[in-house]
Amino acid sequence: MKRIISFVLLAIVALGIILSLLYIPFGMPKTKVGEHYIEKGKQETGAANIVTAVVVNYRGFDTLGEVTVLFISAIGLSAVLATRGKKIAKKIEPASAILYTGCRFLFPLILLFGAYIFIHGHLTPGGGFQGGAIIASAFLLIYLGCRGRRISEKRTKAVESLSGLVIVVVGLIGLAVGGRYFLSNFLPKGILFSLFSAGIIPIIYIAIGIKVGSELAFIIDRLMEESE
Amino acid sequence: MSFLNNYIYYIGALGLILIGLYIILVKRNLIKVIIGLSILDTGINLFLISIGYMSEGTAPIFEKGEAKLARMVDPVPQALVLTAIVIGVAVLALALSLAIRLYHHYGTLNLRKIREQRW
């Protein structure tokens, strides 16, 4: 009975989506705002990567909200998994020497790669969110390979809050100095395709990268602690 | 054949959305429901990206020494999906932590059994 009802529901949803898709041809330009971003984005923001220009410059306030959603979900996870009283520390079997050395060798390299991804966010495919995910994967490697090592919860929270503060402060400076709106560009745009260009975009993206990286590392830390 | 060529991304996205919705509605294991949620999320991301696609378009990133303006895909859906993926990971982690708590409390992940027990 339940199965039949769910199939009917699925058919209704599919019909609705298909009927609306009939009016959306594939592979045609649809939005005027996208065309504007591609034509004028390079001059207006100074970033070669238009997706970055949209995420950080045109829709910067929206991105701040999304980073906040990530923060709230990390806080919620920490609150749900919080246990009263001390847990009994289990004896952890140490990893083999090869695994241990390999993880310790790879850890700084992965961190460096993540930093490269979010520093070059305005020039190449990449950015704060991707770089942050790569940094969190370095911490995951440490947790899986060198068991028994922990990152400090207070330090993670401090780093995360500070980078969030950087975004808000840069946005407020933009509001006061640059123009009429939050997160407006107040720094010189520089030469296109050079590393120090696009005004505040690299600063914001570095802050987002560190924030996302520390939040995801915190989530991994909580889940790993729960699984032991 | 040209129909498939034109609409293969829409069909794939619609398929993923329907599979995810079906798993959420029918399955009783909580972990499977969360997997369905993740599949639904992926389907919606693919759907948004394929709406923004333009035929023979490149990624919206300018390169040094480009002679003429190549046709580029719509950057707005890409920017939205970029953040939606990260939010999806966070929501997945939150859902899994709730599943861990429920398992500790009830000793089972079967939603039918959890519903029968009183709080």
Image (tube, coloured by chain):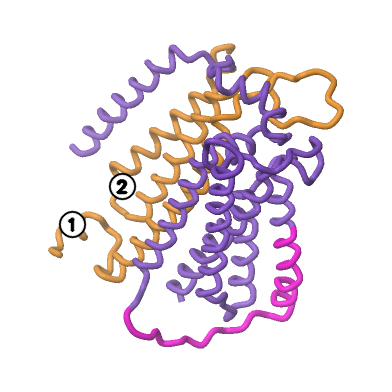
Q: Is residue A197 visible?
A: yes
Q: Quadrant of residue B95?
A: bottom left
Which residue in the structure is indicated by mark 1?
A: B115
Q: Is residue A28 located in the magenta-colored stretch of the structure?
A: no
Q: Nearer the viewer, mark 2 or mark 1?
A: 1
Question: Residue B77: x percent and y percent?
Answer: 54, 30
Q: Quadrant of residue B108?
A: bottom left
A156 or A80, which lies in front? A156
Crowding at label 1, few (<14), some or many (≥20) Cα neighbours within 10 Å? few
Q: Is residue B65 above or below residue A157?
A: above
B3 or B48, which lies in front? B48
Q: Which residues are magenta?
A: A84-112
Q: Look at 47% across and 86% down and name the residue there.
A: A90
Q: Is residue A61 above or below residue B61?
A: below
Question: Residue B21: x percent and y percent?
Answer: 35, 38
Question: Residue A10: x percent and y percent?
Answer: 31, 30
Which residue in the structure is indicated by mark 2?
A: B27
Q: Is residue A51 above or below residue A203?
A: above
Q: Look at 74% across and 76% down and name the residue there.
A: A101
- Disc 2 to disc 1, how far (Cα)? 14 Å
- Indicate the chain on which mark 2 is placed: B
Q: Is residue A117 left or right of residue B84?
A: right
Colour of the chain lettered A: purple
Q: Amino acid at mark 2?
A: Lys
